[in-house]
Amino acid sequence: MTPLTETPVEADSAVSKPWFVYLVRAANGSLYCGISDDPVRRFAKHQSGKGARFFLSSPAMALVYTERCRDKSDALRQERLIKKLKKSAKECLVASATGLSI
């Protein structure tokens, strides 16, 4: 019988999984803010109609902003802050992510 050996713990397992806050542009020009641990996968869900009800009236067109957060709690805090912003301020976030100036 062979003895059980411990496998080394990866450094990444000690760190919590990153979460992201993201903005998606709808066909009508509005911006949707949400959080996810995989914003690209979540955007695909929005495009397929299986994401948020927000996109029932105007389909998701582009993932225009992502911001990495420390953890889910941090992402939720940041989402609340972004949702309180005026649309012009959200557009500034989008512009800063794409390198465009307004």
Image (cartoon, rainbow, N blue to C red):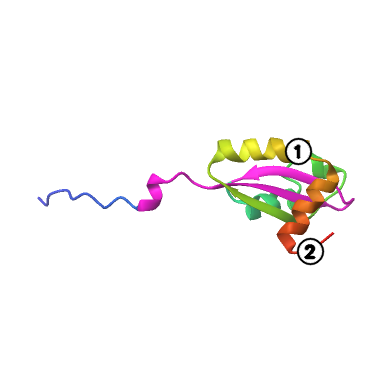
Magenta highlight on residue 27:
yes
Q: Secondary structure at mark 1?
A: helix
In the drawing, what numbered circle is on residue 100? 2
Q: Position of residue 34 (x, y in %)?
A: 69, 42
Instruction: Give the residue at mark 1.
Output: 83
Given the current orientation, which residue lies at the most extreme left position?
Answer: 1
The amino acid sitting under disc 1 is Lys
Q: Secondary structure at mark 2?
A: loop
The picture quadrant where one finds residue 55 is: top right
How many neighbours does mark 2 have within 10 angstroms: few (below 14), some (14-19), or many (20 or more)?
A: few
Q: Bounds of the magenta span?
A: 11-36
Q: Position of residue 4 (x, y in %)?
A: 17, 48
Q: Residue at x 53, y 41 (%)?
A: 71
Of residue 54 and residue 10, the one placed in the foreground of this image is: 10
Given the current orientation, which residue lies at the most extreme right position?
Answer: 28
Q: CA distance from mark 2 to mark 1?
A: 22 Å
- The answer to whether residue 44 shows anywhere in this view is no
Magenta highlight on residue 68:
no
